[in-house]
Amino acid sequence: MQYYSTNHQAPIASLHKAVVKGLAEDRGLYMPEHITPLPQEFFQSIDNKSFQEIAFTVAEAFFGEDVKRDDLQTIVYDTLQFDCPVKKVEDDIYSLELFHGPTLAFKDVGARFMARLLQYFIRQEGRHDQVNVLVATSGDTGSAVANGFLGVEGIHVYVLYPKGKVSPIQECQFTTLGKNITAIEVEGTFDDCQALVKSAFMDKELNEQLLLTSANSINVARFLPQAFYYFNAYARMKEMGKADELVVCVPSGNFGNITAALFGHAMGLPIKRFIAANNANDIFYQYLQTGVYNPQPSKATIANAMDVGDPSNFARIIDLYGGEHSRICSLISGATFTDEVIRKTMKSCYSENGYVLDPHGACGYQALKQLLREGETGVFCETAHPAKFKDTVEGAIDAEITIPEKLAAFMKGEKKSEPMSKEFADFKTFLLKQK
Ligand SMILES: *Cc1c(COP(=O)(O)O)cnc(C)c1O
């Protein structure tokens, strides 16, 4: 399969190149040239299949031309060593729990899949030098990427994070791992971390000495595998006899997760319509109302993984529907919620249903409460385990929540990180010494 850029000014790329480069030369996002529809029979019997079996069929449609069948199967099964259950929250509203992976958030699947796919290509090339992945994080991406790449031979990951600006729960998920993961604590802000990574990619000498790549969330190997979730959601709903008139609601920030769902829809997945739930960062919501895309500086909210003022995957959504506002509006609705509404939603859902929402999932649930129509069944994504946002959630629901074993284990680990100034010269010297 070939990949083109949403800006249409860069050469067509192989999957291998699209994965290694992440972003196209013209700064556009890679899109697969074809979307392979899956046969009717697949959907008819999908409820008899496991998450892993379903995902493998979907993965073959995406990557089957570029990855040997057995290897692809290994990659899929290695990535999905946990479930993605659907739970009933109340009549007609179900939660698709995407937080049963190693760092308890949905980004785990894309990160692990990308790590294994990158490793597959490195081995195929017979490379012996190490690939270095640089990632700047304000919290969640760093933990998903670090854990996805943990122990993957031939790849070393450097996670750059701003000192004192990442919550202790998030920090321990990438500073306690050791092995091929190095955490770098930067004396500066998240923007400084990003600037260091960008400078490294542009530095000629560094790129001659070291093989550098990013694990950005726009990478095709990170975002496409998220489609697995939606095929599985349909299967589990069909099992319960609830799959007709299905509405899927995705709490969205950079819009990667919902874009993967839209790819599923384009492959024939019978979902009636979608809702993109936003926090106060309502750029997509405004686009749906007005037809104008007007990016804004991001606003800090309690659903902070969705604090995005210029969602990168918007370009992919525009590309999927030929830029037609009316087509986009007929398939996707929007919703936007203030922190106050998010808090009230966590509280009411807990007291009425006994279900604990995290601040991101709360946006999804609330959007269904408001927008679900007669006869429809709604499924919203619970994108992170509520314990990842313990203080916010406990404050809202006025009850204590228990920390899952996986998270507690990270918190017991020994924190190790390299102190770093925000000067590129220091970072460069450090990287060159790692060779
Ligand atoms: C990343 C993230 C989101 C937003 O997902 P996008 O793919 O960027 O739209 C929502 N919730 C949580 C918990 C996340 O970590």
Image (cartoon, rainbow, N blue to C red):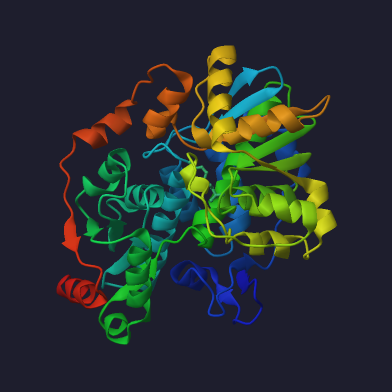
Percent coordinates x, y for residue 296 in the rendering: 59, 60
* Front-lying residue, 180 or 325: 325
Name above or below for residue 225 compared with residue 310: above
The answer to which image quadrant residue 92 occupies is top right
Report whether residue 50 is seen.
no
Q: Determine whether, in the image, residue 210 is placed left or right of residue 122.
A: left
Residue visible at 48% across and 57% down?
Answer: 217
Residue visible at 59% across and 82% down?
Answer: 11
Name above or below for residue 281 compared with residue 423: above
The answer to which image quadrant residue 365 occupies is top right
Percent coordinates x, y for residue 304 in the rendering: 47, 44
Percent coordinates x, y for residue 300 in the rendering: 48, 48
Name above or below for residue 251 compared with residue 13: above
Residue visible at 83% across and 25% down?
Answer: 374
Q: Determine whether, in the image, residue 192 is placed left or right of residue 262.
A: left
Report whether residue 281 is seen.
yes
Q: Seen from this angle, which residue lies furthest front?
A: 340
Which quadrant is home to the N terminus? bottom right
Q: Determine whether, in the image, residue 301 is placed left or right of residue 282.
A: left
Percent coordinates x, y for residue 238 in the rendering: 70, 27
Which quadrant is home to the C terminus? bottom left
Q: How many marks?
A: 0
Residue visible at 31% across and 50% down?
Answer: 165
